[in-house]
Image (cartoon, rainbow, N blue to C red):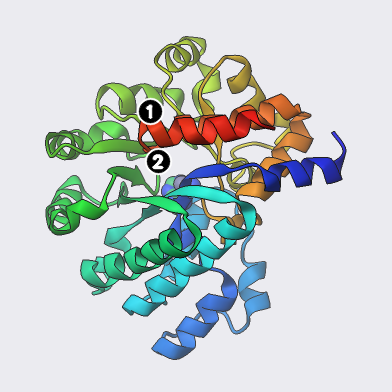
Amino acid sequence: MNRNYLQTLVYAIPKAELHVHIEGTLEPGLIFRLAGCNNVKMKYTSIEELHSAYRFSNLQEFLDIYYQGAGVLLQEEDFYDLTMAYLKKCREENIVHTEIFFDPQTHTHRGVSLKTVVNGIQLALNQAQQKWQITSRLIPNFLRHLSEEDAIACFQQLLEFREYFAGFGLDSSEVGHPPAKFERLFKRIRKEGFRTVAHAGEEGPAQNVWDSIHLLGVSRIDHGVRSVDDPELLNELARLQIPLTVCPLSNLKLKVVNGLKDHPLKKLLDHKVLATVNSDDPAYFGGYLSQNLIEIAEALDLTKEEIIQLAKNSFTASFLDEADKQKWITELNKF
Ligand code: ADE
Ligand code: ZN
């Protein structure tokens, strides 16, 4: 496909994003502005110097910088500005629905209250719905490098804001912190009636995808690219239509794949797995959702039909109700 045509197509089609960490949309310019306003001391002296540190050999190297970046977020307005900047990108790119992760413990452990975080994010989400008809869901993620007890205590506090949340997830360092560590937490979350998702099979093995399904009862897997190592798992994901929220530029920047040409997305689609494309932490990985779609489509030589299929998958796999899913799939059939 010609590059101009590909770009026009990708920007034109309605899309849903299902895997984006709001803290991962924090651009260097906003980090410096907020550090100045909030008197937060930075390790880096300029935007260029900070940006040049965005070279990672693995997930942990990225997470260390990402948690530092999030340290400038203190006031409700900071969370509002952060979220609104991302929603403006959604508007530019025709992302009509977005399911946003945030890491509550990253903020409460610095003394920032849940109320500050949730109110700031939620105000921006409400305005984007009113002004631009962008629909959204909010999904708190627990940090797997912290204890299960800490996550359970945090979940208990989050229940005060329960009407804002569509589900709960699990992120941060996968290796050394398997799904089994959070079985009690997830049982508790599901008992309260929420859906669950979990990062799995990003740096960790395909077994973590099995365990997220069987031990945690998740309805969606974040990343899940290592599933291609296990043919039986691929069959199961396709049979149950358990979605994978795949993030190509993230996988490239965190060395999960050697190059985009080696990325398993095409193999997942060929196996009829319900794969979607997402941006993960776009401020750190060099591209928002459309850029992810364009670069992976070029690398894997995806067809127009496959790109439309990915967009349809993004709605099918979302937490929208059935009528809204159908509305967007009907729109996509017009392309
Ligand atoms: N938190 C933010 N981005 C993440 C990723 N790609 N994997 C695990 N935890 C994360
Ligand atoms: Zn992620």
In the rendered image, residue 110, in percent from the top left (x then y), is placed at 28, 72
The residue shown at (45%, 24%) is 206
Whether residue 69 is visible: no
Q: Residue at x 41, y 85 (%)?
A: 40
Q: Quadrant of the C terminus?
A: top right
Q: Position of residue 241 (x, y in %)?
A: 43, 19
Position of 131 with respect to 150 (left or right) is right
Q: Which element is circle 1 on? A: helix
Asked whether 14 or 62 is in front, the reply is: 14
Q: Secondary structure at mark 2?
A: loop
Q: Which numbered circle lies on residue 122? A: none
Q: Amino acid at mark 1?
A: Asn
Up the image or down, 129 lies above or below 115; here it is: above
3D distance between C-alphas at marks 1 and 2: 9 Å
Q: Are marks 1 and 2 in contact (CB under 8 Å)?
A: yes
Mark 1 CB near ligand 1 (8 Å cut): no
Residue 331 lies, with reference to residue 79, above or below; the image says above
Residue 324 at x, y percent in the picture? 42, 37
Residue 174: assigned label: 2
Residue count near mark 2 (Cα–Cα under 10 Å), binned few <14, some 14–19, many ≥20: many
The reply to whether the residue tagged 2 has its Cβ within 8 angstroms of ligand 1 is yes
Q: Position of residue 39 (x, y in %)?
A: 41, 90
- The residue carrying mark 1 is 208
Q: Is residue 33 left or right of residue 124?
A: right
Tell me the residue at 14%/53% (across/down): 159
Relative horizontal placement of residue 17, taking residue 167 as reference (left or right) = right
Query: How many other residues sit within 10 Å of disc 1, few (<14), some (14-19) or many (≥20)?
Result: many
